[in-house]
Image (spheres, helix red, strand yellow):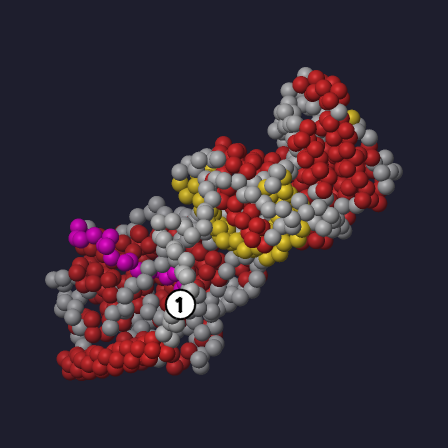
Amino acid sequence: MRIPLDYYRILGLPIQATPEQLQVAYRDRTLQLPRREYSEVAIASRKELLDEAYAVLSDPEQRSTYDQSFLEKTYNPESSPSLPLESIVSGIVPGAETTATEAIDPNNPSLDISKEQFVGALLILQELGEYELVLQLGQPYLHSRDSISLDKGHLGDPQLVRPDIFLTLALACLELGREQWQLGRYENAALSLETGQELLLSEGLFPTVRGEIQADLYKLRPYRILELLALPDENIAERRKGLQLLQDMLQERQGIDGNGDDQSGLSIDDFLRFIQQLRGYLTAAQQQTLFEAEARRPSAVATYLAVYALIARGFAQRQPALIARAKQMLMRLGRRQDVHLEQAVCALLLGQTEEASHALELSHEYEPLAFIREQSQGAPDLLPGLCLYGERWLQNSVFPHFRDLAEQTASLKDYFADEQVQAYLEQLPESTPTANNEWSVTAQKKAYTTTGASAGRSNGHSRDREPAVVGSYSSRERDRAAQTASLAGGSDRASVSGVSTLPASQRVASGTSRVAEPTTQAINSSGDSSVNTAVKSAPPGRSTKVRSEAEASRVRPASGVSTPSAEPGHLDQSPPGHLQRLPERRKAAKNRRSILLVIAGVVGIGLIGWLLIAWIQKIQQSFSAPALEGEQPMVELAQPPIPIPESDSQLIAPGGPLTQDTAQQVIQTWLSTKSQVFGPDYQIDRLNQILVDPVLSVWRRRAQTNQQRNIYAQYNHQVKVTSVQTNPANSDQAKLEAAVKEEARFYQNGEINQALSYDENLRVQYELVRQDGQWFIKDMAVR
C-alpha cells in the first residue's frame, strides 16, 4: 500500500539536509521511543521505516535518484485531508471502503510500504502532528469490511495490531482536541476528545489514556459552557446543552461556593468569577431559575444573585410580585450583612416609602448615602435621592448583567405608571404592627448588630420561616413614591458617575464575604480577572495554552469595589431628613464615647511605640555583626562580579552528564525563547537555538498559526528542575522533570483575549540531546 509520507519527513529533515544533519536526525529519531502503551510490533514497524529512510538518503547515489523523483511533485507537507474534518472526527467517513492508497494526494510525495508497516506509518504521522491524516487513514479499518480483514491478520497479529491502531487514533484525537482548544474552538475540541475516548471505551483499552482524555474534557467544560451560552437565541439546543453542562458542574461542586470537586481546576474564587462571566449570556428568567434553585442549598452567593434576577425581572416586566420575593430573600441576608440599600430599593419599588427610609438609616454605604442626601436637598425626606439612585443603579449595575435587558432603559416613572404595578401595590396590606415587621429599624438593628453572637448558634437559618412581605405604608405613601419617581426621572441633577453604586455584582466578584452565611464558606477574591480569567485551565501537554484560559467573556466580571463603612455617627451629620431623627441625647452620648475612644487609642499607640523602640535597640545590641577577617572581594554596582553572557548567546554545555544547574539553564533558555517566539515580534527562527525535531516542527507550526491569526502572548515563568537523569549508555542524552508556573496573557488584533489567557502550575518532562556542545530539547510532555 501507499502512504502520504516521504523519507525526509520520516526523519524530520528538509531536503537540503547535510549528511551530518541526516546522521544526527536518524540517531535522535531512533532513540526517541513512542508511548509505553505501544506493542513491540508497532515499535519495530516504525524502526523499519526509519532505517529504510536513512539507508536511502545516506547513500549518495540512491539519494540523488530519490531526490529527482521527489522534486517532480509539489512538496506540500501542510496539505489537508480531502474529507471534511467534522466527518473524520465524528467517524462519518463516506463509503467506509476508503483505503490508505485511495486517500493519497497524487500531487504530494508518497511511499510504497508493506501492510505490516502500516501501523508504524500511522505512528510516524501521529508524531509529525498529522492528526487529521491519521484519522482519515486509520478509521476505515474500524468499519465492517476492513475490520474483518484486520482480524484476519492482513496487517499483522490482530491481537497486537488492533490495539495499536486504536491507540494511535485516540492519541490523534487527543492532540487534535488540544490544538482546537488552543484555537478557541471548544465544542470541536470536545468532539475530538469524546471521539478518542469512545474509541478506547468500545474496546476497553488503555485506561490511562482514557483518563488523560477525560481530564481534558473536565477542564474544557467551562469553556464549552461559555461558548454555547454565547450563541444566538435561535440556537436553542446548543444553549440548553450549555445550561446542562453548567448544572453538572454545580452539582459536582455542591453549589456555587461549595467544596466539591468538578475536576475543572477552578478554585472557589475562580468559579465565582466564571459565574460572573456567564451571567451576561443568560436571560433574567434563566438566572432566576438557576440561582433560586442554588440558593436553597443554601448559598449566600446564589441568594444574592437570585435577588438581582428577581429585581431585574420584576422591574423590567412590571411584576412587583417578583420584587416582593427578592425582598423576602434580602431579609435573610439582612440579619447578618449590610444589604440595606438593596432593601431600600425594593421597598421603594413596592411603594413602601417609610420602610425605604428605615432601611437607609441602617445602611453603612457612605458614598451612596452621600449621593442620595445630595440629591434630596430641599426635600422633606430622602425619597428624591433614593429614586434617582435606584433608577441609575438599575440601569448601570443591574440590567447589563442580563442578556435580555442589557439594552433596556430603566424608568421609575414608567414603572409606577403601569396599571399592573398599580393594581398589585393597591392590594398590599395597609399596615402591619411594628412587633411583627422584620423591616422595622429596631428588629433589623438588633439582628445586624448581634451577628457575631448568633452566627455560631444558627446553623439552619435557611430553614427558618420566611416572613411575609409586610410594610407600614398607605396609599398616600404609594402616591408620594410615584410622584417623586416622576420628578426624579426628569431631573437633570448631578451625575452619579463618581459614586460607588449599589455593590451587587462587585461584591460577588470580590469574594461575596459581605453576604456569607454560617453554612457557606467565606470567599476572598484577590482582584479582577476574567473566563477566561476565571477559567485558567488549558489543554495539558501544551505549554502554549488557551485560556482557562471562558470565559468561559468569554465574559468580563466586575472588579471588586469596597465601599467605606461609615460609623453610625456619620449619619448624624446628614442634612435634615429621616436620617436626622435620632434624639439629641443619643447623639451627645455617642460623641462622648467617640472622644474617649480616640484618647484611649492615642495613649495605646504611644505605649506600643515606646515598647517597640526598646525592643529594636535590644535586638541590635545582641546581634551586632562580627568584624570581617581577611581580604574581601571588590564588588561594584556598575560591573558584575562574574561575567554575564549575552541574552541571545548559545548555552554551551560542559562534557559529562547533565547537571542540575545546566538543566535549570536549559529550561530557562527555552521559556525565554518561547516568550520571544510567541511575542509580538514572532521571532520564530529562535526555536532552532533550543529545540530539535520532532518537537521543533510542532512548536514552529504553532507559532506560524498564531502569527497568521495575529495572536501574540506575554509570558511570566517560574521554573524549578526537580529531577535530572542522564542516559547511562550515552551522556549526550538526558531526561529531566521540572515544575513550571506559566502565566500567559494572549492578545489578538492588539486586544487582550481572556479566552486564551491562563495561569497554571505544570509538571513537565523534557527529553534533551547534546549536539555540538549544546543541549537541545527534542521532546516534552506534561505529566
Instruction: Report the span colored magenta.
Output: 491-513
Task: Point out the image quarter for the N terminus.
Answer: top right
Number of numbered markers: 1
Work out whether residue 199 can be spotted: no
Query: What is the quadrant of residue 5 in the picture?
Result: top right
Q: Is residue 45 left or right of residue 498?
A: right
Q: Is residue 206 left or right of residue 580?
A: right
Measuring from the top left, give residue 417's x and y in whole percent: 26, 54
Magenta residue check for 494: yes
Work out whether residue 152 can be spotted: yes
Q: Is residue 514 above or below residue 155?
A: below
Query: What is the quadrant of residue 263 in the picture?
Result: bottom right
Q: Nearer the viewer, residue 427 or 469?
A: 469
Measuring from the top left, give residue 192's x and y in whole percent: 63, 42
The residue that appears at 77% across and 29% down in the rendered structure is 55
The residue that appears at 53% across and 66% down in the rendered structure is 259
Magenta residue check for 536: no
Q: Nearer the viewer, residue 197 or 604?
A: 604
Q: Is residue 577 above or below residue 221?
A: below
Q: Is residue 112 left or right of residue 17?
A: right
Measuring from the top left, give residue 286's x and y in whole percent: 46, 54
The residue that appears at 17% across and 66% down in the rendered structure is 381
Q: Residue farthest to the left?
A: 378
Magenta part, dominant SS: loop
Amino acid at pointer 1: Leu
Measuring from the top left, give residue 523's x and y in whole percent: 44, 65
Q: Is residue 609 above or below residue 706?
A: below
Give the residue number, with chain letter if any, for mark 1.
Answer: 628
